[in-house]
Amino acid sequence: MINSAKYFFVVSIFFFCAVIQNSYAQKFSASIERTTVGQNDRFQVDFTFEGGDVNSVSNFRQPNFAGFRVLSGPNQSSSMQIINGRASGSISLSYILQPSNVGEFTMGSASIDYAGKTYSTQPIKIKVEKGSPQQQQQSSSGGYNQQELAKSVFIVAEANKSRVIQGEQITITYKLYTKLNIASPQITKLPSYEGFWSEEIGPIKQINFDLEMYRGERFRVAKIKQVALFPSKTGTLNVTPFELNVPVIVKKKRTGNDMFDEFFNDSFFGRSETVQFLAKSNTLKVQVDPLPGGAPASFNGAVGNFTFRAEVDKQNVTTNESITLRMNLSGSGNIKLLNAPQPQLPGGFEKYEPKTVENINRGGVVSGQKIIDYLIVPRSSGTKEIPAVEFTYFNPSSKKYVTLKSQTFKINVRPGVGGEVASNNFAKEDVKLLSQDIRYIKLSDFNLEPKQEITFIKPWFWLSIVLPLLGMIGAFVYKTKQDKLYGNVQLLKFQKAEKEARKRLKLAKAALDSQQTTNFYSEISFALFGYLEDKLSIQKSEFTLDGAVEKLQRKTVNEALIARVKQIAERCEFARFAPQGEMQAAANDMYEETVKVIIDLDSSIGGKK
């Protein structure tokens, strides 16, 4: 009887422990480094789920981060362990935040679904003070403060020239130096190139580290970005810092003083953790000198080293037969900003808007060619002469203006059908037929009947009068509107912004379908930036994302929509650093989001010019 009672007691104890273990097997909690932070501090908040099969966790819903700016996240990590044959694991999602104001804030609950149940975290109260009272704390950096990390992980911006002529290329290279182990960096802020036209070099598809000495110390260094800048203004211009959020893997030190701490602080037993560090490049200053005086009249701002060739496809034509005058500009310099020379045509020629094709090589020195085709039509006959076309550029190497000339083109224009010679021939034929037109006049045997008088005018008669008149009025209104549009380039670009964006999005879609991830993100960037340039009347040479955002704010565009614009720009830039497979998976969502943003921008801006 006693043995039965003992057996029942032992079984009950095990059953009770199992119930308690199962009751507390799943746990979802939020933790924060510290509850008091400085206004300029960056801190980490973690949402951790602990339970059995973490692969069944789904539908994570982040809290409202009102009062804070999300610098990074969610960054996911997970772990699994087996104790006494029982598997358990945890999954953690972390964010790097920065306060946007001073005061006391409450971060709401996050929630997650697991095995048909919803788990939520407790709200967190955070106090934000002026300054950075916690900057010197080292607990969140594994024993490293921000100053120590800044000496081991940093970005250096280098310019191949510090003094240039307006329009001359400067190459900026950004290098990431590190002594510590790091994970994949994420872009926090792109540099601003105010006063420059920029061309991305590369782009760099994969980050590769090499060993290099810097100021007497050995670092692992990788080139992360390279850009060619062409100054459009003179004076001292600044290139703002490039910012990356770098996950740094550091050894976590124990803080106790007993013998076990000393033992486990040994490198063999050392534990590591990942801390977030904001790396900034240095600010570059570039002195831009004005172009020297004495420029020829044919100079149109071209700076570099170019060749020029012009030719016509035919020199013997008839009136109203089209001729193509092709100009080919090639060499090194800012090909995109080259303005085509204007040919001077003799009287009796009509010229149409040129068609331009660009082929740009974005290597260490930007080079390529621009082909401009003018369609010209002779309206009168005779021997015509198209004067030589001149193209002038400034060569920074020789410090001189160079003028290149084409040959003179002689065009022999013969009269076409309906010309002057044909009209004279018809007149001679009429004279020859006069003798055959005289016939004997009959005087009798006439069979004449009176013709009925027309009592009304047929409807087609009025239509034949009114329709041509309406057509002439419509053509006149259309021509007046088109002349106004072409006379106002900004208005024309404003009205064609959406059309040009659609063309770029088609190219992006084609690149997406053929899995050309890098080209896809480049076309998405061109579509969004080109739309903003045209819609906001920003010159290509003066376009910056910050400037576009400022103009959108002046047009009272919704802040949430502006944030979506900035997010697309940052994701396009980040695409160069991320693995291709990861960016390919997100490409479809990126395409749809860009289309929605451009549509929303067009609806928001509307007719606001």
Image: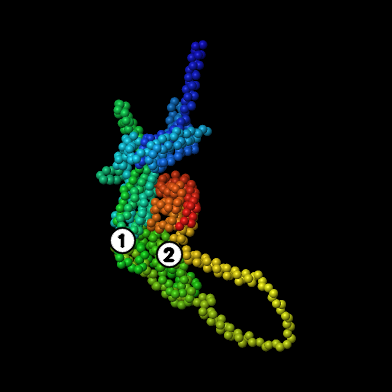
Circles 1, 2 touching at the beta carbon (< 8 Å): no
Q: Which mark is residue 595?
A: none
- Reading the image, the residue beneath label 2 is 372
Q: Is residue 58 above or below residue 459?
A: above
- Reading the image, the residue beneath label 1 is 290
Badge 1: residue crowd in 10 Å (few <14, some 14–19, many ≥20): some
Give the structural element (helix, strand or loop) at label 2: strand
> Which badge, 1 or 2, comes first in the chain's sequence?
1
Res 319 visible: yes
Who is closer to the viewer here, 382 or 188? 188
| Residue 559 percent across, percent down from the top left | 44, 48
In the image: residue 593, left or right of residue 397: right
| Residue 96 percent across, percent down from the top left | 39, 40
In the image: residue 135, left or right of residue 608: left
How far apart are the two marked residues, 1 and 2, measured between alpha carbons? 28 Å
Give the structural element (helix, strand or loop) at label 1: loop
Would you identify the image quadrant in which residue 195 lies? Answer: bottom left
